Amino acid sequence: MSLHFGTLYWPSTYPDPVRYPRLSERKKTRAVIIGGGMSGVTCGYILATSGIDAILIEQNTIASGSTASNTGLLQYSNDTMLSEFAKSIGEEAAVLFYRACKQAAEHLCGIAEGLRRKVDFKRRSSLYSASVPEDVASLRREYEMLHRKGFGVEWWDEDRIARHFPFHHYAAIVTRGDAEVNPYLFVHSLAEEAHLSGLIIHEKTSMLSVKPSTSGYRVTTDEGEVEAEHIIYAVGYVPEKAGGKWVRAQMNRTYAIVTDPIASLSDWHERNMIWETARPYLYLRTTADNRIIAGGLDENIRQPVLTEQELHAHSMRLLSELHKLFPGLSPQIRYEWCATFGESVDGLPWIGEDPDRPGQHYCLGYGGNGTIYSMLGAQIIRDHLLGVNNPIASIVRPDRVIRSPYSM
């Protein structure tokens, strides 16, 4: 199944990445990671740097799936607000989860800054604005809870927004500690670092079956097999490949455009990442070479569009929304795509051991915060393999009771 359609920007920034051999023999290891995208490679990096033997297999090439269409925003705030999580899972668990997301974002920032290869990483603040006057009250409640719990946020009224941006929004929360990155470069660079730390990587290696064995499980591939104690499913937005009965995701599609480089972005205060309370929401960021990335227009359809005409119609809508916010700019679309993404009813990812299949783990970062969730998943699975209690594990466990924050 195709996960995206159109012209992707990120692969053009690294046209000749490091490649890894196909698995063509029998091997034995502690853990097998299935999937070479953001979740799989992050998990491989965390396991390898923690001294845990692991092999990663990817049916295509590293970062060729949904990672190539990831727009590279690292934000600890979720599509589901802290105040909404407090209703569905309780305030204590909600705050614990949000703090873990903030710590995961900081961990990712630290890794990105220390990589040998530059990955267009830049720390940024985020402007989360009220799309309509009716959203101001709920946004204010979110600000007050974030502020009360020590997240260091700022409240901007419409006058303050107007002093810093060429658009009118009714109110906004400004969060610090976020960042932007080239996700394609990041995942490839992370794979290179993980490989140097002992992770074995095999591309062009499809998982055909997983069966019990004397040492745990036997993973059979096209031309080889691996014996392992643990299986980690980092299969992105194809949850059926993970098997089991616990993952009940809603698959949707989203759109994104990348412009030609802009001569000046002086009207864009601190190059903040911008998103809004409307659902589906519009989001904007800039790139290292002065391009603008705009995304949104989400639809409850799994399959990406299949014609250039349909794709371009959505791209022009995104460009129109961009021009409303920054009327002084005249951006031209250079890249455009539609991509599949997954969500859960409760806004939480599926991470942890399948209770029906001991030794088989999910690392599925579904939601608008997939990169942050990938790091949480890697940490939770590593801690499980080391016998360490992770306080977030019970919140995102696969067999949790699913409660929608919007029905409370």
Image (cartoon, rainbow, N blue to C red):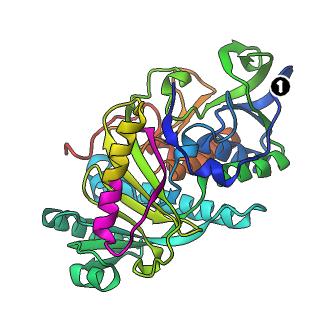
Residue drawn at x 62%, y 65% is 121
Q: Is residue 229 above or below residue 311?
A: above
Residue 309: x, y in percent?
37, 38
Q: Quadrant of residue 231?
A: top right
Q: Quadrant of residue 35?
A: top right
Residue 265: x, y in percent?
46, 77
Give the amino acid type for the residue marked by disc 1 in the picture.
Lys
Residue 297: x, y in percent?
32, 47
Q: Is residue 25 above or below residue 60?
A: above
Left or right, residue 391 beside residue 148: right
Query: Which residue is labeled 1 in the image?
Result: 28
- Does the magenta run of residues contain 329? yes
Residue 207: x, y in percent?
67, 20
Magenta segment: 318-343
Left or right, residue 121 beside residue 269: right
Residue drawn at x 37%, y 55% is 94
